[in-house]
Image: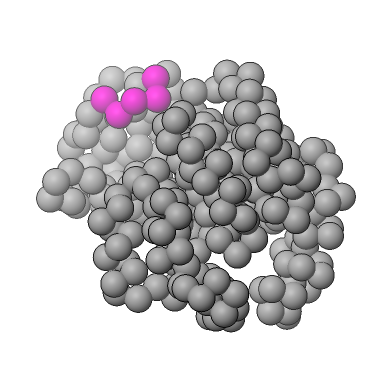
Amino acid sequence: MRLLIKNCRWIITQDEKRTILRDKSIVVEDGLIREIVDKPYGSFDHVLNAEDKAAMPGLINTHTHLSMTLLRGYADDMKLKEWLETRIWPLEKRLTGEICHAGALLGCLEMVKTGTTCFLDMYFHTDQVAAAASKAGLRGFVSHALIDVLLGEPGRETRRLIQESYNRVKALNNPRIGVAVSPHSPYSCSEETLLTAKQMAVENNLILHTHLAETRGEQARFEVEKGVREVEYLDRIGFLCPNLVAAHAVWLTVNELKKMGEKG
Ligand SMILES: [Zn+2]
């Protein structure tokens, strides 16, 4: 299959100099960019006119809860803690695979429309999220959100859920969809859950994903409860590692950012 993206006003490359090319055409053969030319030649199965457009690599969204697209606007005037504890978590206990699949498909559609081609998702019914992303032709990593109040026995249950999620997603046999490991956050997971998840991520070379320092209130409560800030706590228990992708990280100090950098 030959595709021509004709007369791009700009082509934003990601070479070492981040070169921006002007007024050129891109020839794609069987899903791969074959060449970038001034004047295209030969015949094409599809031609896209990009005269007033920029062509660029797909965007990557490093933190999604795709199925939650269905819940957008639900009690969105509440503070994060109350919203999660009184509205979202009780509702999420009743979610079905079918609902997660529908929500994830909607989320995928929004990504396709806005140029995002890869994502890192944390939610439930990961096989359904993976199936939706496969259908949409996207790349991504899916993971089961591990939250202590939803786990029966943190240690054993953590392992079981990670393994189950891994097996189900691998059964789809789509090399574009990978699995990640996601303890929800330092405030909603015990040390045991955090470390079991980290160990499994490192042993299997998977992305380790968590929320970190999302709101000032959450951070203050954590400090009162544990007597230490999140990054120092995570460092002390041995959670920080190169596999970690921390979502939000809004309220980190310069030193905490440095510490995270040192740990990879
Ligand atoms: Zn999140």
Query: Chief secondary structure of the magenta span?
Result: strand
Applied colour scheme: one colour
> Could you tell me how many numbered marks the image carries?
0
Examine the rendering and report whether any part of residue 176 can be seen. yes
User: Does the magenta portion include 70?
Assistant: no
Examine the rendering and report whether any part of residue 44 can be seen. no
The percent position of residue 226, horizontal first and vertical second, equals: 55, 71
Residue 3, quarter of picture: top left
Q: Nearer the viewer, residue 193 or 57?
A: 193
Which residue reaches farthest left?
A: 17
Give the residue drawn at x 26%, y 50%: 12
The percent position of residue 101, horizontal first and vertical second, equals: 74, 40
The percent position of residue 244, horizontal first and vertical second, equals: 42, 49
Residue 125, quarter of picture: top right
Give the residue drawn at x 18%, y 51%: 18
Give the left or right position of residue 96, taking residue 254 as reference: right
Q: Nearer the viewer, residue 198 or 224?
A: 224
Which residue reaches farthest right?
A: 94
Q: Nearer the viewer, residue 38 or 10?
A: 10
User: Does the magenta portion include 33?
Assistant: yes
- Considering only vertical position in the picture, is 34 above or below 19? above
Give the left or right position of residue 249, taking residue 91 as reference: left
Give the left or right position of residue 52, taking residue 129 as reference: left
Give the residue drawn at x 30%, y 29%: 33
What residue range appears in magenta? 30-34
The percent position of residue 62, horizontal first and vertical second, equals: 47, 52
Residue 39, quarter of picture: top left
| The N terminus sits in image quarter | top left
Give the residue drawn at x 60%, y 64%: 187
